Amino acid sequence: MFNFTKNKLIIFLLIFSFLPLFIMRLVVYPIAFNALRDEIIRNLRLAVNKQAELIAAWMEGRLSNTRYIANNPFLIQAMQKTGNALTIEVNEYFKSICSDFGYKEIFYADRNGKILFASNKALYGENILEQDYYRRAIAGAFFVSNIQSSLELTGNVAGFQEADTPAMIMSLPVKNAPDAILGVLAVCVDVAEIDRVMKSVHFGKTGEAYLINKNGYMLTTSRFTDELLQADRIKKRASLELKIVDPYTKKPTKGALECINGGEGYDAHGYPDYRGVRVLGFWHWMPDYDWGVIAEIDVNEGYGKLYTLRDSVMFVFAFLAMGIVIVVFLLVKKVTLPYR
């Protein structure tokens, strides 16, 4: 009877002592974890939405500027005339626009595909009749290319050979009447501008937002370019070279795959990114441009403070457990001593 009472007392005291610790680990910790998880995903969503808005506004600005240039009465009149003085004046006008808006090149080609005016004199006289952006615009469309290397975009036109960098071309017909197309105006846009837009939003030491195309290639620079170069994953830059795949499985990352499929979503549990590091991510597809925005942060950084709290709780739990067991046995021994 004595031993039975003693054992019940030990069990009661142990349960009473450990109950607060169990509640902290099984109830308080999950609540704190879920709250932090929701906050991280909310911040990633805000970062992605902000980036998408900035990119859309930037693109609309470039499109609007291109339309304005093509509809400029001075330009339309100049394109119907000839003369060295006029050519110099138009070329200088194009140069000033490139300087003001950060364009790579602006040029105009007639109905035969010959470039008559250009911000870069090396382009003057080149024929772009076979270029896709010219053919689409001379047919009456406002054409916006994908982001590609300038050499791919221009078909190795001489004036671009020294500047093989990621770019995009916007082209549209120049008209002096609703149905009278004089030629094509083309603007070559440096996507470094998009990089600057993307870098305007910061979050965390490992957090980054980047742009991908429908083929899963990164279109902007990576925060981890040095690591990628050292691993021989890229030769010059991440843009157009780095495919967003898990380096170990060679399969698209979860964020890239779901984004390319036209979705918006997130992963709060963690998945391997293009470095093979587990990250938390949020993604959003921009169908107007066939681009996707992905924001990611390393799991260890995102949940770092909570992991530290968890480890601290477990350490304290183990330390107190040892102490509680010792105290309970000593206390029970002392309480039950008179009944022996």
Image: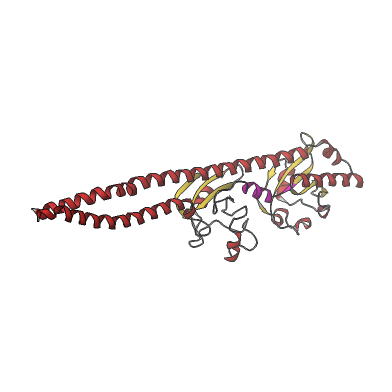
Residue 59 position by quadrant: top right
Whole-percent x, y for residue 247 in the image: 51, 61
Q: Residue at x 37, y 53 (%)?
A: 313
In this view, which residue lies farthest toward the front?
Answer: 338
Does 211 appear in magenta? no
Query: Does the rendering let one see residue 83?
Result: no
Whole-percent x, y for residue 164 in the image: 71, 58
In this view, which residue lies farthest toward the top?
Answer: 178
Position of residue 42 in the picture relative to residue 195 (left or right): left
Position of residue 294 in the picture relative to residue 325 (left or right): right
Whole-percent x, y for residue 226 in the image: 60, 62
Q: Residue at x 73, y 54 (%)?
A: 154
Quarter placement of the C terminus: bottom left
Task: Say if 79 sits above or below 166 in the image.
Answer: above
Task: Say if 218 sits above or below 138 in the image.
Answer: below
Residue 72 position by quadrant: top right
Q: Which residue is drawn at 24% across and 55% down?
A: 327
Q: Which region shows up in magenta?
A: 187-200
